Amino acid sequence: MRLSLTMFLLRLIMSFVIVLLPCSGVHSVLHAYSPGDIIIGGLFPIHSKTNRSTEPGPLCCDHYEIRGFLHTQVMIYAIREINQRKSRPLHNYTIGYDIYDTCADVSFAIRATHKLLKNHSCLLPEPTTKAVIGESSSEVSIAVARVLALSSVAQISYSASSELLSRKLKFPTFLRTIPSDKHQTMAIVKLVEKCNCKTVGIVGSDDEYGKYGSDTLKDMFNEMKDICIEFSEILPGDFSQKDSSANKILDELVGKINNSTAEVIILFTKESNVYTIFQAAIKHSLNRVWIASDAWSTSGNLSPLSGIEKAGKVFGFISERNEVPGFEDYVNSAMLKETTNDILENFRTLYPNCEPINLANMIDQDASYNIYLAVEVIVEGLRHLLKCDNHQCERSPNFTALELLLEIKKVNFTVNNTHIYFDSNGDPLIGYDILYWNMTEPNQSCIQKIGEYEPNEKIIVLHDGYEHLFDLTAYNCCKTCEPGHELKKQNKWKVCCNDCVKCAKGEYSAGNGTECKRCNERQYSSENRDMCVKKDNDTLKWSHPFIIVLTVLQVFGIIVTIGFAVVFTIYRRTPIVKAVGGYMSLVELFSLLFCFCVSLSFAGNPSKTSCKLGMPLFGIASSLCISCILANLLQILVGFNFDLKKGSWIKNLNQPLGVVTIVSGFQVIQCVLWMTYYAPHPVEIILDKTVFTYCHSGSYIFFYTMLGYNAFLTFICFLLALQGKRLPDLYKHLSLITISMLLFLMVWIFFIPIHVNLIGKYTQAIQSIAIQISCYGILFCHLAPKCYIMLFRKEINNEKAITEYIRKHYEQSNMPVVTS
C-alpha cells in the first residue's frame, strides 16, 4: 500500500516536471525532429504558460494544449503523406521536420527560431532549415519574422492575420495561408450593416493583432454616417490573469457594456481574454450580440461554457473552412502511437487515458487545414525549384533559402478545391466563412456556417433559413426621434444611441429615426426642421405700393408727354417752337415718351426679354433726346454768332438732322452690339429664404460706356448752355436747358455707386426711378415752360415781341442790333 502510494506520488511529480520543463526558461524547449534531404521548421504554441507567473491562467488546461499538440501532428502528417505518396512530387528526395514549442511567448519563440537556424554562422551562412511554418499569433510571428528575414528563410503562418505583417519592407520573408485582418475588418463592418445595427462597442487587446484590428474598425466605422462607436477598449496584456488589477478592468468593462446602448460588441482579441469576458457575460446575463474575430470564433473552450446562451448571440469569422484529408483517420488509428518524439511523449504523459475518438473531436479544422496548405505550398515551391516532373528532379537539394522563398511567392495551384496564390504582400485571396453559435446544444457542434464573405464583396447567406438570424430587432435599443431630429454621430467617442439631434439649417427629417435630408436649393427647412418650405421670389410685384406709385408716375409721364406733343404740333409754326428746334422738339418728346415706356419694364419679375431690351433701349432713347437738345443749342449759338472768322465753320454745325443722326447713331451702334453679343440677362441669387432675380448687365463695359456717353453729351450741352448765357433769351431757354442737364448729370452720377452696391429687389426699381427723374427733369424744366407760354402767354409768342426784346437787349449791352 505504502509502495503504491509512493509510486503514485513519484508519477505525479514527474508529470508536473514534464509540464513545466518545456517552458521553464532553463531547460531546452520541447521539439520533434525527423531527418530528411530538406528540412522544414515548425513553430507552434503547445503550452500557454511560462514559469514567469506562479498564478495559473484560465487556459492552462487540457484543451489548449491538445489543440497545440494536434497542430504539430497536422504538419507531421502532411509531410509523412507527401513522403509516402505513390506519385511523389519530389521523387527520391525526402522532407524532414524540426518542430519547436514556442509556449505562446516571444522570448521562447526567438530561442526556438535560433535553434532552427543553428547551422547559420559566419563560416556556414546557409541554414539547414529552408522554410518555417508558424507561428500562431501575430505578435509572436512578428518577432520570428524579423529573425528569419536575416537568413531569407520563408515563414508561412497559418493563423497570424495582422495587417502589419503585410508590409514587405519590414517582413520580406513572411507569407500566410490565412487572409489578413484588412479583409476581416471589412467583413465585420459588412456584417454590422447586414444586421442594420446603429451602435457598436469594440474591445481589442494590447498586442499587434488586437490593436490593429480595433484601430482599423474604428477608422471604418467613423467614416460611416449611420453607424457609431459607443465605446472602444484596449485590454492590457495580463488581462486574463486573475489578479486584482485585471479584475478591476473586467468589472469596469462589464459595467460599460451593461450600461451601454451598443447593439453589437466586437471582440477583436485572443481567446484567453474572451474566455474571461464571457465568464462575466454569463454571470451578469449581458445578452448582447457578439462578433468574434478569427482568433476565437471556433473556440472549443468557449462554446461549451455552461449558460453561454445568457451572453447572447455570437457571430464569427474564420477563413474558408475545409478538412485535412485523412487526418481524422490518422488520429483515430494506431499509427498515432507508432511514432515517437518528444512532443508525443509529453502528450502521452499528460493524457495517458485520452481516447483517439475524443482527440479527433477536438481537431481545429480551420488552423489544421491552413497548416496543411502551408506544407503543400512549400512542396509546390520545391517542385518548381528542383525542376521536378513526373519522372525525376533535375536539380539537387543544394539550394539557398532565398531561392526557395522566391519560388514559394510564385506558386499558383489548387489543393482540394482551394485555389491558393499570394499577392505582392504575401497574402492569399481567400474568403471567410460566417459562423453562428447555435445555443440550443452547448458543445463544439453548435458552431454553424451560415454565410460567406469574399474579399471586398457583400455578405452571402447560404439559404433563406438563416436570414432570420441577422434580424437584431430585439437588440435594437435606439428610440425613434421626433420630426426634425435624427440619431446622429457627434464624434467617435460620444454615445449616440438615444441621442436625437436637431437637423441642421437647410435639412429636414420626418422623424421615426430617419436621417436628416437636405432641402433643394429652392427650399429651406421649416423652423421645426420637419419639412421643406419653398423660397419666396424676392421681387417687387405689381401689387406692391412702391411699384404702384412708380407705375402711376410712369403713366402720368406718358400722358403729359403725349399732351405736350399735341400742343407742340398745334403751335409748330410759332416762334417759340422754332426756338426749341422746330420739328426736333417732337423727336425729343418722342424719345421721352419711349423712355417712360421702357421704365415700365423694370417693375415685376425680370424676364429674358425685359432684361435684354430695358437699358439698351433707354440708352438709345436718352441719347436721341440729348442729341436733339445739342442740335438746338448749336442752332442758337450759330444764330447769334458775330465773329466773321469763326462764322463759316460754326455755321457748318447748324445741321440739326445731321447732328442728331451722327451723335445718336454712335449710341445706336453700341447698344445694338451690346444686345447682340453681350445682352443683359436675368440672373438668380439664391439666399437663405428667398430667390432674388435681377438683370445682369451682360457686359459692364457696354453698360458703363452707354451711361458715360450720355453723361458726356449732357455735359457738352451744359457747357454750351452756359456759353450762351449772355445771348438774348426771351423764353429763358438756355437757363432751363442748363438746369435740366445738370439734373440729368446728378441723377446718373448718384445712380452708379447705388447700382454697384445695392443687391435686392429694389435694384430694378432704382433704375426705373433714375430714368423717370431724368425724363421729368427734361420734360418740366425744358419743355413745360414752353407749353405754358403757348397756352397762356400768347402775347410773347410772336415775331414782333421777339424782335423788340432782342433790340432792347443789345441797346442795354451797347452792341449793334442784328436780326436774322
Image (cartoon, rainbow, N blue to C red):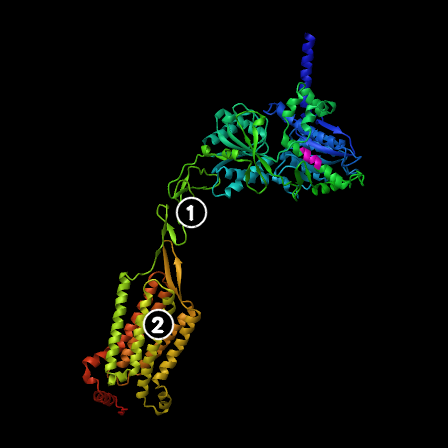
* Residue 375 lies within the magenta run: yes
Identity of the amino acid at label 1?
Lys
Q: Position of residue 561 (x, y in %)?
A: 26, 75
Please name the predominant secondary structure of the magenta segment in the image.
helix
- The disc, 1 or 2, on the residue closer to the chain's N-terminal end is 1
Q: In this view, does 172 lie to the left or right of 553?
A: right
Q: Where is residue 682 in the image (x, y as percent from the top left)?
A: 39, 63
Above or below for 641 versus 764:
below
* Res. 569 image quadrant: bottom left
Question: Could you tell me residue 714's position as x and y percent?
Answer: 34, 76
Region of the chain picked out in magenta, as a range: 371-376
User: Which mark identifies residue 535?
Assistant: none
Tag 2: residue type?
Phe
Instruction: Locate the N terminus by quadrant.
Output: top right
Residue bearing the label numbered 2 = 618
In the rendered structure, does residue 513 fall within the stretch colored magenta? Answer: no
Between the C-alphas of marks 1 and 2, the distance is 47 Å
Classify mark 1: residues with Cα within 10 Å, few (<14), some (14-19) or many (20+): some
Tell me the number on the disc at residue 517.
1
Report the front residue among 556 and 88: 88
Q: How crowded is mark 2: few (under 14 residues within 10 Å), some or many (20 or more)?
A: many
Residue 662 higher or lower than 699, as above or below: below
Q: Is residue 640 visible?
A: no
Instruction: Identify the secondary structure beneath mark 1.
Output: strand
In front: 661, or 701?
A: 661
Secondary structure of the residue carrying numbered label 2: helix
Q: Which of marks 1 and 2 is in front?
A: 1
Q: Which residue lies furthest to the front in this view?
A: 464
Counting the numbered discs, the total is 2
